[in-house]
Structures are given as C-alpha cells and as structure tokens.
Amino acid sequence: MHLIGHFVDGKRVGGSSTRRGDVFDPATGRRTGEVELASAADVAVAVEAAERAARSWRDASLAKRTAVLFAFRELVHARRDQLAEVITAEHGKVLADAAGEVQRGLEVIEYACGIPAALRGGFSENVSTEVDSYSLRQPLGVVAVISPFNFPVMVPLWFVPVAVAAGNAVVLKPSEKDPSAALLLAEWFAEAGLPDGVLNVVNGDKEAVDALLEHPAVKAVSFVGSTPVARYVYQRGSMAGKRVQALGGAKNHMVVLPDADLDLAADAAVNAGFGSAGERCMAISALVAVEPVADDLVARIAQRMTGLRTGDGRRGCDMGPLVTAAHADRVRSYVEAGVAAGAVPVVDGREVTPDGDPDGYWLGPTLFDHVTPEMSIYTDEIFGPVLSVLRVGSYDEAVALVNASPYGNGTAIFTNDGGAARRYQHEVEVGMVGVNVPIPVPMAYYSFGGWKSSLFGDLHAHGADGVAFFTRGKVVTSRWLDPRHGGVNLGFPTQT
C-alpha cells in the first residue's frame, strides 16, 4: 500500500506519528494509499525548517524570486495533464474539470511572477526641508496555508505563489482526502530553484491544524473550508496573535429575471450546479426564478440534465463521483430530507446508473422545484449535485431572499436589462457577482472572497489583497545631509 508522507526542507520525509488516514479512488471505492497524519511534533519540524529558510529568502532579490516563479510556471504548464490525473484519481472530478482547476492555478502563478510591480511602494520627496518619505512592503516570515479537498491544486496556488513571491516561507497542510497533488507542487517548486524549506507540506487532520494555529513562529494563516471550521480557525488563530484569512462556505443564488435568455440561463444552471459534482464553494445551489418563467426554466434545465453522463472521470463523463462514501451518504440524506419536506424532485440523482465501478461514490445530478426557504436543502450548504429552485414574484423578493442568507460568497443574475443588472450588483450583499456569468470567480489580478459567514478576516485571496495579506507595510522618513557618490562604472546595469 502506497504510503504518503510529508515534504520538509526540500525532500519527502516520514513523520514521527503512527497515525494514518486512508486515501481512496472515489470512482471505484478502492483504497489506493495511506497518508501520514502529522503530530504537533511533525508540524514543529516543518515550521522550524520554514523559519530557517525565511531568514535568507526574505533577502533574496525580486529578480531571484521571479526567476523561480517563472520556472515553476513552466513546469506546471508542461505537466498539467499529469497533475489533472492525480486530482481525478484522488478527488474524482472529471479530467476536463481537473485540467480547468490547474489552469486557474496557473493564472495565480502568472500573477505572482509580476510581484515586483505588486510590491512597489510610494515615494514623496521633500515632505519637509531635505526630508523624504517612502513606503515599503516586507514579508511576514512563516505563513501557513490550510486547503480543502475540493480543489487540491487551485486553492494552494491561490496562496503559495503569492506568499513565496512576497518573500515568505510556507507550511502547507492539504486535505488528507487527496494529498498527493500538493506534494507534487512542492517537488516542482524545488525543481524550479526554490530553496529548501521555503515550501513545506505537512499532511494531517485537526491535530496538525491546531499545531499550526498555536505555533508562535507562524505569523499568518490562510484557510479555505466550511463555515464552522473557518470560524474556528479565525477565532483560534486570531487569539494566538496571527493574521488570518478564513474563507468559509456558501449558498450561492442565481436569480433569473423574466426577460432573461432562458436557454442561456438553463445552460448556466446545469454547468454551475453540477460541475465537479457540486463540490465547489462557488457552485450554484439555489436558483431563484422570478415568475412567470419558473415552469419554462425548470423544464429546460431538466431536459439538459437527461443528457448528462455520471461516471468515472477518466471515461469522458460529464460528472464524477463524490469525494468519499461518507460525503455521498450525507448528500443523499439531504435529497431524502428535501422529498420529505415537500420539495418536488424533478430529477432524482439517487436513480442514476453510473458509467463506472458500482462501488464508486455515486449520486447523479438532482433538481428540486418548489423549494421554500425553511427547507434544509435550501438553508444548508450541501456541497453536492443538488440544485434547488425557489419561485418568487418580483425582483425585490429575489434580492430580499438572497440578502437574508447568512452566506455571501457568490451570486449571479441573468437578465437582458442593464438597469436591473446594475441595480442588483449594487444592492446584493455578496462578495462576488456575475451578470449572465454563473460562477463569477475573478481573474488572479482581482481578489477572491465573499462576505458575511463566507469570510472571516478582512483580506481576500490573491490579487492585491493577497499581496497585502502576506506583507507588512512600513513607512520610512529620511534626511541625508551629505549625499554619497559611487565610482565610475560604464558597464550596463544588471539585476542581482
């Protein structure tokens, strides 16, 4: 049985803990490996390696840092198919979706390659007589990244390239459900020239998380996961004096106005509701139909769902399995609860015949109509391929429904009315808004993050917020009464 360890100080290592977790292929239900679950002592070893590396890496020139980032980008790009295969083998999403995840991660690497511009400070000459002031941004030191199972490549790449480019050393704890991709990224970073200890990967569960939250050398923590755990990470990390950005769960609404192109809206609802088996924090799980379009829209969505193939992600299917047997059972229980509460199951995913091993963790795309706000299939983040349709009588009712949700991650409005779209983006209490775009994940040079219970902390992921999160501002006021002059050198100036 394949044993998956850690990556510390530039190499794969085993830990001191004897605890293990099972790794499965979700499409077959077969156990494919065991992952070491780090103890607090194992975490301390990784943090100590990061501390040593951070002292010199922070002084590495921007030219050196960007050279490593460019080389890393080329390695990931050249091996993106290999990375997608690893994602599919442990998470279960179809290969095309895994390849898309890698591409979105590459975009953040490319953004981090431009770190010299992002770190550029300001300068004010002669603020007082012969006195100048200027601003700097400097790295924090050791930072931790705790990433979820649903995006084992993209989410680590939201944070690690920016943190490293800014001069920090990183300890990454990926999900124990699909840990192999993170180890590959660490090896490729080392191959690209990243010094030993600047990026370390520690596999583990809550014990490892708590150790990172408590270690005094860890200055900041980036987390993505469910809202209860995000709240826990934020509170515990903040109490320990750390800077924390904890991205939580979501219940993303897609509002369809009567003037919308219903074919476009139906396509978008299927794509955004069932891609990656609904295991996306930006998945559309609540479709708000403003009457009188609900009957027509539901029929168009159901018709499109009949053509979806659920099965092994390596067989060209549209949707793969859920990540674990326990999670599949949990999502299935929500379907049962929806039926019991009186929602109408237009398409019941429990009846799916998958193109895959019968022992895989299967649940087909599920569509509920006539869902009401008190039903658990609406109130809870299901994190599975379950789309709920709620019917409202007006635009105002739709906005009130969205804003009443405790979550505020993403939302979309489908309409051909520019005035309505502009009003919606202004009034809705959500961090990321799409206009005729169902999953409004921003490009890497903007920042990703929601509002309300979808984010704990002030700064979002990647983009300008990411740079701000992984650096500290400093302002210098200086006076030089006797300017110094260098010697003569006619050589072309170079970066070192």
Image (cartoon, helix red, strand yellow):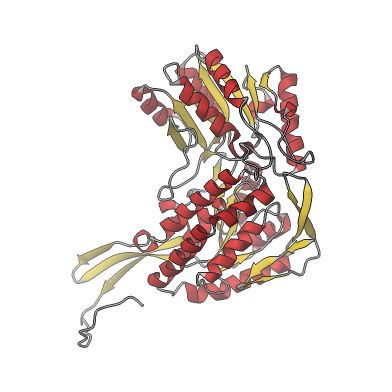
In this view, the residue farthest toward the bottom is 487
Q: Picture coordinates of residue 495 (x, y %)?
A: 33, 75
Q: Could you tell whether 324 is left or right of 218 in the image? A: right
Q: Quadrant of the N terminus?
A: bottom right
Q: Picture coordinates of residue 324 (x, y %)?
A: 74, 44
Which of the two residues, 35 or 448, is positioned nearer the viewer here?
35
Question: How many numbered marks are there?
Answer: 0
Q: Quadrant of residue 17?
A: bottom right
In this view, the residue farthest toward the front is 315
Q: Could you tell whether 447 is left or right of 485 in the image? A: right
In this view, the residue farthest toward the top is 292
Which of the two residues, 18 or 347, is positioned nearer the viewer here?
347
Which of the two residues, 244 or 481, is positioned nearer the viewer here?
244
Q: Quadrant of residue 249?
A: top right
Q: Could you tell whether 425 is left or right of 347 in the image? A: left
Q: Quadrant of the C terminus?
A: bottom left
- Rendered position, 413 above or below 484: above
The reply to whether residue 371 is visible in this rendering is no
Q: Picture coordinates of residue 436 (x, y %)?
A: 43, 29
- Rendered position, 214 above or below 232: below
The reply to whether residue 225 is visible in this rendering is yes
Q: Picture coordinates of residue 119 (x, y %)?
A: 37, 62
Q: Residue at x 61, y 73 (%)?
A: 9
Q: Residue at x 45, y 30 (%)?
A: 428
Q: Residue at x 53, y 74 (%)?
A: 195
